Structures are given as structure tokens and as C-alpha cells.
Image: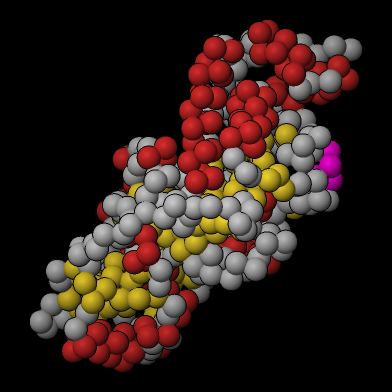
Amino acid sequence: MSSTLSSSLSENFISHAKKHFLKAHEVDDFINACNRPLRKSIRVNTLKISVRDCVNKLQSYGFKFEPIPWCEQGFWVESGSANENELSLGNIVEHLQGLFYIQEASSMLPPVALYNENISHFDSPMVLDMAASPGSKTTQLAAMVDNGGLILANEISASRVKVLHANLLRCGVSNTCMTQFDGRKLGERLAGQFDLVLLDAPCGGEGTIRKDPGALKNWQLSKVEEISKLQKELILTAYQCLKPGGRLVYSTCTLSPEENQQVATYLLDQSDAMVSDLSSLFEEANRAVTKEGFLHVLPHIYDSEGFFVAAFSKPELSQVKLFSASKNDVFSSLDKKSYQRILHYYESHFGIDLSSLDLQMKRRDKEAWLFPKRFDDICNLVRLNRSGIKLAEIYPNKIRTTHEFFSCFAELIRRQKIQLSLEQVEDFYKGRNLEVSDQIIQDHGVDEGEVILTFDEYFIGFGGLKNNKLKNQLPRGLVKDQIKL
């Protein structure tokens, strides 16, 4: 029996799909999949927690898990409740702690295609995420390289840079710098700088029909062809930024060949790029692989969002013209006295040795910052929007630490920790100050001053302890009216 075409599916699009990428026997399965709600999925953030521990925590809420075959940290999730809206993943404390990221399953594919066991010889890679917001793939890449190397996350929209920054901090990402540019303008300055480049390109979004019913309602081929022109410019720039011997992944959440295969073919025609076959990227990848070795994931194949992924390599002997860097004086080196003072404070108060971190410390006015070791390689080439981790504000008589530092490194801190009760966690996330008894202070062995606050052993924030009162230091943007415990 033929499936009914819903009002959200354009007849023009279905005709286009039948002509270019849908086989006759797939049409009903495709339409049925597009008419079904998208399955919820998450990726465990291994920068903060192991997969097993995270799954165990979430199972206590009644969630049920099905592994996503291409991502060891990814799972489809069901609430286990008759009322799917009864429990929101975004409002449970483990999400606020950054222990997992709510991410569509197919969108986990591009980072896996970019950085996997076949090319993990890049121990400390320079990575460019060319269209990064909201940060799902950037945070995934950061976890895959365990915060090593350096990731440059670019986003053209100022408002989306703020969202990207917030997600990086929540997930404890410390190896990422951010830029705000039209990606097409990065090529000259960043030519030949990156081992790995991800271009998750702006696209028509045809594959998002299951979460956005209007995605295909007013589909027009002319709009597809228009955005394809932008994608071709972007992919040439992405390839220009790649080092000889490096790897580029191009991806979209759309389905038409004009935005996918034709863009990939354009790169091959205009450069010395070579295709990296993805047919063995994961078990059953062959179900979605094209004759060229790309992945064309239709919604019905894995019961997911539609996606396209293509991987390329740049020959070792490829010629690259490097840009002449200019000195950036925004940040300076710390003088020895200030550096030793900072090291002593964090060692004596929190039991953490900052000199052991694979990061460099710099100063800007009264602020101390931590940056990836290769930060200078990038900041001298291109203007950065947000980068590094602001460690603290330095005053003559005190050091005031930031929430973002603790969010990234709380697990390394050995003292000055207080475990909060369920009621205290709720009050804390609502922005309230807390009362702390003498018994709790004694049991936790904390001194007055800055104190790390945890729930179930994982960081939620920090406060200033004085006279049994804990002043809430949660950033205003993280205050929540409702959380689920």
C-alpha cells in the first residue's frame, strides 16, 4: 500500500527525490519515516564522566537506552513513561552539569568520520570547525581528542557565538578558540594550518523534516541551487585551510545532490583533493554509502535525521602558501611573581597544580587566562572572538576564580568541596545563597573562601563561604527556575 503524503512534504520535493536519490522501493519507507517524530538522542560527554556512569545515572530516572552504531558515546533515549513530556532531558541536573549533550544521532557522524582510529595519529591536532554553533560537533571533537591540541570554532552569527560559548563551558571544553567570520574569508589567513577541518555547511535542512515539519513544505529547487553556490565557496576555503596530509569532512543535514554530491564533486574538480571512502566507518555503513564512498543517510535507513557526509584528504606534496603572521598583543605573559602567587593559591587552597595542565597561562589587565599551547599560532593569524579559559581576576589581596575554570577542571581539585543535598541544589540553581552548618564544614574539611559545590560528586558551581553563609557565584545566565532532581 502506498503511503499518504502529508501536507508537510512538498510534491515537488518528492518528485525531485524520486529522480535523483530515492529508489522506487524506498519511497513508502521514506515518507513513513518523515511522518514519524524524531527519536530523542544524547551523547555522553566523556570529558566529565564515563559512558557507563552516565547511563547508570540516567537510568535512575527511568530512561531506556539504545546504542547508536556509529558513536560509542551516543544513545537513542526513551523516557520509559507513557507521557513523553513528563521528563525533559534538558532540565535534569546531569544536563546542567554537562555530563551529556542532547544531540541528534546523525549529527554525531561527521566528527566520527573526521577523527577515528584510522587517522588518530594526530596526537595533538589542529582542528577547524568552520560552522560550529551551537557546538554539538565541537564538543564531540573536544571529547574525542580529550581536550588536546587546539580547535578553532568559527561561527558567523554573533548570537550563535554566545550559544556556542555557553555549550563549550558547560561541557568543560578547554582547547577551543572562537572566531566570528564569514567562513569564505578564512582561507588566505589560515591556509595550510589545520590537520583536520570540519565543514558542517549551512544547508536547506531537508533532512530535519522529522523535528521541523515545515522543512519541506515550501521546497523550491531554485533555493537549493542558490545555497549550493555558497557551499561550493565554503568547501574550497575549508580545503585551503587544510595542511598537506590533512583530512576534511564536509557534511549537511540535507538530502538533495545539488548540496551534497555535486559540492563534493566540485571540490574534486577544483583541487587535488582525494576521496576517503566511508563505507567501513561503522558496521552497516554500507547501507548508506554512495558509489563515490560518501554517506547519504536517508531518514528511513537508520530511523534518524537525514544527513550527508563526505571525507577528503590532501596529498602530502600539495602546495600551500602560508600567511605572514602579525604579533597580537592583547594577552601578555605573566611576570614570575604573579605566576607563582597564582600557583601557590590553587595548590594550597584547592590542591590543584596548575603547572601540570597542558595549557599556557597569560594575562590581560587584572585577569589570568589559560590557553591551548598552540594558541599563539592562531591568534597571530586571525582575530579571535572568545578563546581560552578565564582562570581568575587578580587583586592585591585576593584571587577571584571564575565558574568556567571550575567547570573545566573541578574533577582535578582535591579539597574545598561541599556535596549539596537535593534541596540545596534546587536552591542553588535558582540563584539563592545557602546556609552551611558547622557540621557540614567540619565533615567536608573546608576553609572559608572559595568552595566547590557538587551534586552526586559532579560539579554544579561554586560559592564564597564566610560565617556559615555560602554566597552563590552561579553566572546569571545559568540560573534556572525549574530543574528535575
Q: Which secondary structure type mostly characterizes the magenta part of the structure?
A: helix
Pick whichever, 62 or 268, lies toward us.
268
In reply to whether residue 286 is colored magenta, the answer given is yes
In reply to whether residue 422 is colored magenta, the answer given is no
Question: Is residue 406 placed above or below 42 in the rendered structure?
Answer: below
Question: Can you tell which quarter of the image residue 222 is in?
Answer: top right
For the point 49% across and 67% down, the residue is 149
Pick whichever, 271 or 350, lies toward us.
271
Expressed as whole percent of the image width and height from the top left, the position of residue 139 reads 51, 56
Question: Is residue 371 placed above or below 61 in the rendered structure?
Answer: below
For the point 42% across and 37% down, the residue is 184
Expressed as whole percent of the image width and height from the top left, the position of residue 123 reads 58, 71
Magenta-highlighted residues: 284-288
Question: Is residue 116 placed above or below 295 in the rendered structure?
Answer: below
Query: Is 349 left or right of 150, judged from the image as shown?
Result: left
Expressed as whole percent of the image width and height from the top left, the position of residue 188 reads 39, 46
For the point 54% across and 45% down, the residue is 239
